[in-house]
Amino acid sequence: MFLPKRSSIVSLAAFLLLLALPAVIQASESPYKDAEAVAQAYFDAMRTGDWHGMARLMDPNEIGKLKHLVVTLFSSAPEDDPEVQEAVAFMFGPDVRAADLAATDPADLLAGLLYTFHALTPIIYESIEILGSVPEGSDLIHTVTRFTADIGDIDVTQVVVISLRLVDGMWRVIPSGELDAVISALEQAIMQMTP
């Protein structure tokens, strides 16, 4: 069975930690309440394990980049290789085949990835508070949050900025820089699988 290296799992866990900050969000009278409501829905989806809901609140252009990379990487690997299929099933779910990746909705791919890696690295989000938001132009808002989470035996309290972009009239969460760590981990996994 193909299993990614521990460093790849840690990188993906860091990505999930910064992406998925569910919990209780306190009510706010902020002038940016629409963007903050999207942030709250995003956190609530993560808290309840609604990976599809969480992925659908993200900027579709950004998660489309992840899909493009996934399709590119897996299309370069031999489709009939059982290790390739095992890796696809491990990362995106048992019903997903390498040949189906190009036709799969980007949000569904991300949801499968989030489910898998959250299962590998259980994180209990205890609380989150939106401290405020700062606009950058008319279509970008940075929401400052403080969260407390339990990762195994470690309690973590951290201030994190979640950015949201106005896309087709709706606020969408922009994946954090940890998406690059996921992309690197995927690239390393494919390189390990190909001769």
Image: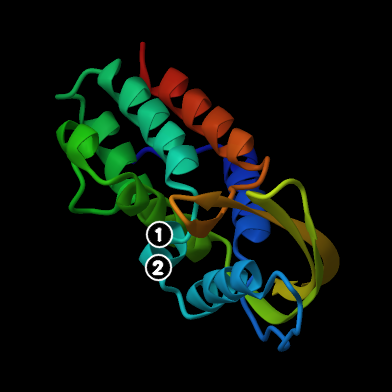
176, above or below 173, in the image: above
Q: Are marks 2 and 1 in contact (CB under 8 Å)?
A: yes
How many neighbours does mark 1 have within 10 angstroms: few (below 14), some (14-19), or many (20 or more)? some
Badge 2: few (under 14), some or many (20 or more) residues near its Cα, within 10 Å?
some
Q: Position of residue 21 (x, y in %)?
A: 65, 68
195 lies left or right of 21: left
Mark 2, secondary structure of its residue: helix
The x, y position of residue 167, in whole percent, is: 49, 49
- Mark 2 and mark 1: Cα distance apart in space: 5 Å
Of the residues shown, which amino acid type is indicated by label 2? Gly
Task: State the image coordinates of residue 192 (x, y, percent, origin top left).
Answer: 45, 22
Q: How is the image coloured?
A: rainbow
Q: Quadrant of the N terminus?
A: top left
Q: Secondary structure at mark 1?
A: helix
Residue 125 in picture, x, y percent from top left: 66, 77
Q: Which mark is residue 9?
A: none
Q: Which residue is mark 2?
A: 53
Is the residue 108 above or below the residue 4 in the image?
A: below
In this orientation, which residue lies closer to the viewer: 98 or 48? 48
Q: Left or right of 72: which side holds 20?
A: right
Can residue 82 be seen here? The reply is: yes
Asked if one can make out residue 123 in the rendered structure from this viewpoint, the answer is no
Query: In the picture, which quadrant includes the C terminus?
Result: top left
Dot label at residue 56: 1
